[in-house]
Image: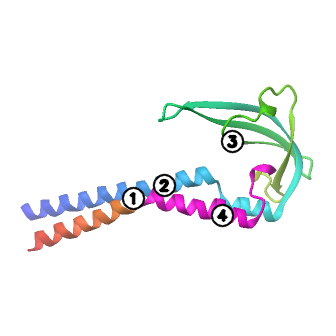
Amino acid sequence: MEPYQSKQKIKLRLIRNLVIGLSAITAAFYFVYSAAGNPYHEYLLITKGVTTNGFIADAEEIVEDGDDGRAHFSHYYSYTFRVSSGKELTSHGEGQGRLPNELNDLKRPYPIKVIYLKKNPEINKVKNTISESIGELLWRKIGLGAVLFIAFSSIGILLLKNAITEYSSAIKMQNS
């Protein structure tokens, strides 16, 4: 009965380590996706987007204490725009750094250009926040996103590799 329990412990340790490794890879994917956004949507906006006028109606600056002891700034804004059918939509965006001066004290809505998909206007962005070309999109979103994903997921990959190696070694030792 002792070897059976031992095999059970080995399998449980393998499963635990695999779950931790896959969780690390999933966290890396989520981090890169949240930082870079959906590159396919941006591609569609660049190639098939319709530009219209919109207005930023609300903006807020967020200040957080960084690990380095310095303040880190980001901002959030909401905007409205009309699609070609006349329907008005409200959306939002966010950015890193200080809130632009023109959005600090919004007494009147601030005019902007919005780009959206005619078939799915819920996919939209403020025009000056998307890549200007397919080349820039490939570099900024795909290239840098892949580099970030590889860097952050390497921990998970190492955990998976070590889990499999540890499992193989434990099984070999048990069988000999």
- SS at mark 3 in the image: strand
* Residue linked to disc 1: 156
On the picture, is 104 further left or further right than 73?
right
Question: Which residue occupies the foreground of this view, 53 or 69?
Answer: 69
Seen at 70% across and 31% down, the residue is 60
Assess whether mark 4 and mark 3 are in contact (beta carbons under 8 angstroms).
no
SS state under label 2: helix
The mark that comes first in sequence, 3 or 1, is 3
The question of residue 132 being in magenta is answered with: yes
- Locate residue 82, reporting x and y percent: 88, 46
Question: Which residue in the structure is indicated by mark 2?
Answer: 28
Name the image quarter holding residue 169.
bottom left
Residue 4, above or below 124: below
Name which residue type carries label 2.
Ala
Badge 4, how many Cα within 10 Å: few under 14, some, many 20+? some
Tell which tag, 3 or 4, sits nearer the viewer: 4
The answer to whether residue 126 shows anywhere in this view is no
Amino acid at pointer 3:
Glu
If the image is split into quadrants, where does the C terminus sit?
bottom left
Which callout, 2 or 1, points at the residue further toward the start of the chain?
Answer: 2
Residue 104, horizontal then vertical, whole percent = 77, 28
Task: Determine crowd level at label 2: few under 14, some 14-19, many 20+ residues with C-alpha closer than 10 A.
Answer: many
Q: Mark 2 or mark 4, which has the lower sequence index? A: 2
Residues marked 2 and 1 touching at CB (< 8 Å)? yes
Q: Mark 4 points at which residue?
A: 139
